[in-house]
Amino acid sequence: MNLFSYDSLFSRFLYFVADIVTLHFLWLVYSLPIVTIGASTTALYYSCMKRIRTGEGYVGQNFRRSFRENFRQSTLIWLVLLVVGFVFICDLRIGMALDSFAGTFMLVSCSVFLIPLLLLFLYIFPVQAKFENPVFENVKNALIMSIRHFPCSLLLIAIYGTFALLLFSFPPFAGLLICCGAGLTGYVTSNIFVYIFRKYIPDELENDLEASGEHFE
């Protein structure tokens, strides 16, 4: 097979790299107003999961469509998370400053509520990208999934932690993240979400195989 033919392994790798870089810069550009980070993150996960499931390469088109369709709900979710996160940070700072029982109580209570907030942050935008439900329903489902699939949640935390560690300890990896960080992170973690979501949509795997031109033996 020709190295540069459309179906060659090398060509498919180049297309994959191009898609990852494209998604990275789309996410950066669409996130610039800050308030749109939720919608751009939802679009990133939608495009990554679509590519993983069917091999479909129209990542730019998928990203823009998802951004438009999920803009209102994703932006609302992001702004609420931003406000709640800011309140938690303020409470933690106050608790650390108070050398009393009240300070200790604030630190403990914040730590307890910080865990579900972190789990929600990990799952909410992929869930929003996948399921067409009201905001409250998706928030509830995101929390339930994060607990029900807790080993996967730990794996997600490990992935983000590893990326953060490499970012500060291995300069070449920092350069890689500058070029394609959002796309790479979204793609790696989307594999986990595809695995999780297929448990709630039994026919999806078969439909995806048909869409990608593959068939069961």
Image (cartoon, rainbow, N blue to C red):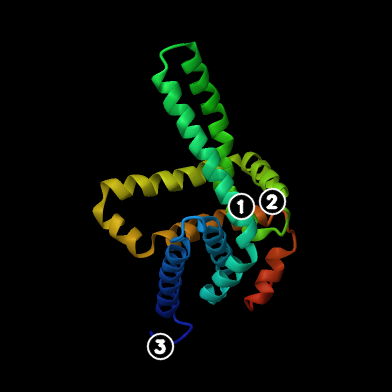
> Compared with residue 85, is residue 1 higher up or lower down, i.e. above or below?
below
* Mark 2 nearby-residue class (10 Å; few <14, some 14–19, many ≥20): some
> Compared with residue 153, is residue 6 higher up or lower down, i.e. above or below?
below
Three-letter residue code for mark 3: Asn
For the point 59% across and 36% down, the residue is 116
**Which numbered disc covers residue 135?**
2
Determine if residue 194 is in view: yes
Secondary structure under badge 1? helix
Q: CA distance from mark 3 to mark 2?
A: 49 Å
Q: Are marks 1 and 2 in contact (CB under 8 Å)?
A: yes
State the image coordinates of residue 151 (x, y, percent, origin top left): 57, 41
Indicate which label's residue lies in the foreground, 3 or 1: 1
* Mark 3 nearby-residue class (10 Å; few <14, some 14–19, many ≥20): few
Front residue of 181 and 33: 33
Name the side, left or right, on which 202 lies relative to 12. right
Q: Which residue position holds label 1? A: 76
Q: Quadrant of residue 43?
A: bottom right
Q: Which residue position holds label 3? A: 2
Q: Earlier in the sequence, mark 3 or mark 1?
A: 3
Indicate which label's residue lies in the foreground, 3 or 2: 2
State the image coordinates of residue 180 (x, y, percent, origin top left): 38, 64
